[in-house]
Image (cartoon, grey):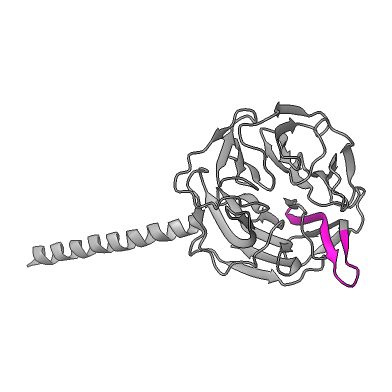
Amino acid sequence: MNKIIALFSALLVLASLLLFGCGVTNSSNNNNNSGGARAWSQLLSAGAFAARDGFPLLAFNGQLWIIGGHSYSYGTSGTDVYWNDVWSSSDGITWTMQTSSANFSPRTLHTGLVFDNKMWILGGSRDTSYDMLNEIWSSSDGITWTQVSANPVFSGRYHHRAAVMDNKMWVSGGTGWLNDVWYSSNGQSWTQAVTNASWPPRIGNGFISHENKLWVINGYFGDGETWSSPDGASWTIVPSGNSALPRGSHFFGCVVFDNKMWVVGGNRQDRWGFVTDSNTSYYSANGSNWTESSATPSFTARHRHGTAVLNNKLYVVGGGTTASGYLNDVWVLQ
């Protein structure tokens, strides 16, 4: 009898291990894929900063930073407004204007990055004629900005992208249908890694560093594909796997979060060329298999917004919409 009881108890223990073991596995997957464990929440419906799009959102020194951008003054005689103000926040809720007029001229569609304990902005456009800038500025405090280079060797551009890898800053593509790649270790001397990369010219694509590679992701007139390079010169298209990335998505946020590459919001272009805003997010650890995030509720659909990661939280700030103009709200995925 004792043997029977012992055998029955052992079977119960085994069944419990199998049941709860599967439960632990599913929970772990949710934490990693941001499916059921994470959710979007709105921190602010309207921040202290003006509604805008076309600005870099950086995470630096324990704070989020908004740098410049563009908005539109609606009314009987609407006008475009270009900004050179700088705002910071440690939590996405309370924002402080560090300067209302930085040393650089008002601009939009510039790119930004953090490198060598400084914030950097590169290129952009500063008026409705969409002039193309290539000047480079940096700041260690967000208040005082220094022009590192007034005219670097790469051409003026906007809608370009920048990343940091191998202790270098990298700049890629942009308006003019460019597919060149440049790098620098100091912001003054730039070297061209490739004049025409293997990936076709595009704008509004993702360009980030992940797992010791540079990655180009989708973009305007892109075909939903992903490219990678270990050196910025030699590029390989990544096998599509079960990619969920929609064709032609562009002007999205692109960051590394939870050890994965993320594509957040942006415009979607169908095969007939029609463009709509999106609030969908996708993630991938290898650039081949992309999964649509099931985190809900999601933020308002938008494009050319700011996206950054701070303290293991993914933030979406501001941006433009085709339906209601410009935004100054703040959302977080955690």
Residue displayed at 83% across by 65% down:
50
Image quadrant occupied by the N terminus: bottom left
The region drawn magenta spans 62-81
Residue displayed at 49% across by 54% down:
291
**Which residue occupies the foreground of this view, 313 or 47?**
47
Residue displayed at 79% across by 56% down:
66
* Residue 310 among magenta residues: no
Instruction: Give the vertical position of 178 relative to 264 (above or below).
Output: above
Q: How many marks?
A: 0
- Residue 180, by quadrant, is top right
Q: Residue 274: where, in percent of width, then height?
A: 63, 58
**Which residue occupies the foreground of this view, 28 or 153?**
153
Q: Is residue 297 left or right of residue 26?
A: right
Q: Is residue 202 left or right of residue 121?
A: left
**Which residue occupies the foreground of this view, 173 or 8?**
173
Q: Is residue 101 left or right of residue 309?
A: right
Looking at this view, name the residue that lies furthest to the left: 1
Residue displayed at 84% across by 64% down:
72
Instruction: Give the vertical position of 12 relative to 179 (above or below).
Output: below
Q: Residue 147: where, in percent of width, then height?
A: 89, 40
Residue 211, can we see it? no
Q: Residue 260: where, in percent of width, then height?
A: 55, 48
Image quadrant occupied by the C terminus: bottom right
Q: Residue 133: where, in percent of width, then height?
A: 85, 42
Q: Is residue 17 left or right of residue 326?
A: left
Main SS category, magenta section: strand
Residue 176, can we see it? yes
